[in-house]
Image (cartoon, rainbow, N blue to C red):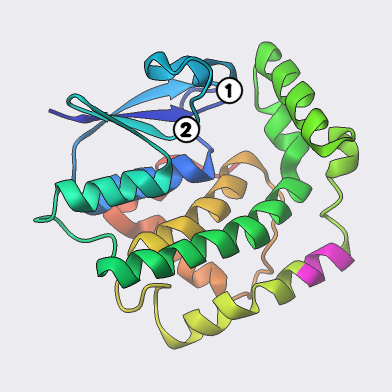
Amino acid sequence: MAILLYDLVGRDPSRPFSPHCWKTRMALAHKGLPVDIAPVRFTDVPAIEGGEGKRTVPIIRDGDVVVQDSFAIAEYLDDTYPDRPALFEGASGRALARFVESWSQRTIHPAVVRASIMDIHDAQDDENRAYFRRSREASFGRSLESVQDGRTDERLKAFAEALAPLRATLARQPFVAGAQPMFADYIVFGAFQWLRIISRFELLASDDPIRDWFERCLDLHGGIGRSVPAAA
């Protein structure tokens, strides 16, 4: 039986863009597990699987088991399918991946939001545009237009400098996790894939070696990352 993945989309159901859902897509592909996709929009998410307004994506259903949150899903997959390729190297690997997740969500995710929040807004249907604007403006305390301030030379330079630890790591090894990709790679990949799908704006310089790693990740597992074309 295939695992059901609830995956976030906008107006076009063929263009899933959530960084967290992409972590899970890559994790499932890494495990070689069959998957069925259930596309959902922002306003659908709270009620998934009887969520009573408390759901976030990704969510998977594996038989009778429902798991929410990309990291919890990765842990579940390793615990439930230990005979398939591992996403973590034991407890220490999980702890290190948690660090990577914290770093990515505090370094890459804010930069993506500042560079593309209007692209995210524009990719929704009318109902979800209204929801996205209302909820995000309440969270930021200002307009979406004023949030999108990440396309200046100063912002791009600061972001490039913030990626120095990632760049130094990838100068020594092909993947964040070492010789082969693991969940730590999918965490960072999800953030850059988010931008690739939702916006034509480039945060990485054309000669940034991080691009080489990202291209390798796009080719993994039969090129699942390339199954959704970049924003045009």
User: Where on the picture, by quarter, is residue 140?
Assistant: top right
User: Where on the picture, by quarter, is residue 154?
Assistant: bottom right
Residue 143 is situated, as x and y percent measured from the top left of the image, at 89, 33
Q: Which mark is residue 199?
A: none
Q: Nearer the viewer, residue 42 or 208?
A: 42
Classified by dominant secondary structure, the portion drawn in magenta counts as helix
Residue 53 is situated, as x and y percent measured from the top left of the image, at 53, 18
Query: Is 201 above or below relative to 106?
Result: above
Residue 232 shows up from this direction: no
Q: Which residues lie in the magenta part?
A: 154-158
Give the amino acid type for the residue marked by disc 1 in the picture.
Answer: Phe
104 left or right of 14?
right
Q: CA distance from mark 1 to mark 2?
A: 9 Å
The reply to whether the magenta stretch includes residue 177 is no
Q: What's the residue at 55%, 44% (across, down)?
A: 230
Q: Which mark is residue 57?
A: 2
Q: Which residue is mark 1?
A: 42
Crowdedness near tag 1: few (<14), some (14–19) or many (≥20) residues, C-alpha within 10 Å = some
Give the amino acid type for the residue marked by disc 2 in the picture.
Answer: Val
> Among all residues in the image, which is located at the extreme left?
83
